[in-house]
Image (cartoon, rainbow, N blue to C red):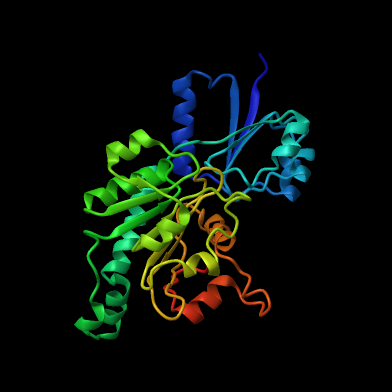
Amino acid sequence: MDTIRAGFFEVDDGQAQYLIEGIRRLGVADRVQVDFVPHPLTPDGCEAYAQYDAIAVFIGTKVSRTTLEALPRLRLVLTMSTGYDHIDIDACRERGVVVCNVPHYGENTVAEHTFALILSLSRKLHAAYFQSLRGEYQVRALRGFDLYGKTLGVVGAGSIGLHVIRIARGFGMRVLAYDARPQRLLAEVLAFTYTDLDTLLKESDIVTLHVPATPATYHLMNRETLSKMKRGCVAHQHGARFGGGYRGAIVGAGGGDTGWRGAGCHRRRGVHHRGERAAEDALSRTDTEATGASAGAVAARECGIYAPHRL
């Protein structure tokens, strides 16, 4: 059997060592010649990798039709992520290139981060941090609210959403969920209720989104849907393309005429950039396009958004 040439892109030394050990454990080290590249694969650099039969990439690499044409031997593309919107699936299909992704990983990690951000808002930890930097101690300004007894609305009760629900129930929260594929048995086991989106938005004190970025979810949260939320409601989005593929987050606390405020994106292993796109897809930019301002900038100015990273 011929040796398979494979290249792993966007990996650091620690990841490369882990992969080498895995190849040895599988007993295929003599059949696979692997190269590790720390930077993304770009169309301009494909010539150096034209001999590869397989590539493994992360979300910084755009596997476009141009890239595929520059890799004539390519038969397999593996993305080390759940999302695969950075890969031209149609072009791969036309060329007979198999595409693989990682369907599940880090669901509990994302769910815990979701609650870290919610708690940061409910206890005003971010405001307290900046007060300490300024040497200010205005206790009344740092009054938060308890999660116990509040209603959490989970839009997208998939792998991540269900972990969020489990944690929420531990806080003593009532949970409403909206999902295209309800799982009634899990609702009974975890003691939450499925409902329609309008009811969820109207009754929830906190709303968290964990949905794939598809045509059906494009601009899911816009001025109309936000207006249905309670005044003072907290809105949290954990953007995800194709089943939770990236980990961008928006968090908001209510206030002003709109009744909502938002926050920034979570950086983790470089997926921040995809999180930005999810945020902009899910939050309608109808009112910002005329001014040329980004959705994040306008929301920050108008709604007092806590935005540690650009949306």
Residue occupying the point 44% across, 42% down: 158
Residue 200 visible here: yes
Q: In the rendering, at what x and y percent does residue 141 appear?
A: 25, 82
Q: In the rendering, at what x and y percent does residue 183 appear?
A: 40, 36
- Going by the image, does 43 lie left or right of 223? right
Residue occupying the point 62% across, 75% down: 288
Residue 106 visible here: no
Residue farthest top in this picture: 1
- Going by the image, does 64 lie left or right of 123? right
Q: Which image quadrant for residue 46? A: top right
Depth order, front residue of 93/288 = 288
Q: Is residue 103 above or below residue 268?
A: above
Depth order, front residue of 194/2 = 194
Q: In the rendering, at what x and y percent does residue 145 appear?
A: 24, 69
Q: Is residue 185 above or below residue 166?
A: above
- Going by the image, does 82 lie left or right of 51? left
- Going by the image, does 6 lie left or right of 207? right
Q: Is residue 136 above or below residue 207?
A: below
Q: Which image quadrant for residue 123? A: bottom left
Quadrant of image for the N terminus? top right
Q: In the rendering, at what x and y percent does residue 218 appear?
A: 60, 56
Q: Is residue 37 above or below residue 277?
A: above
Depth order, front residue of 4/151 = 151
Residue occupying the point 50% across, 81% down: 302
Depth order, front residue of 123/46 = 123
Residue occupying the point 52% across, 46% down: 245
Q: How many marks?
A: 0
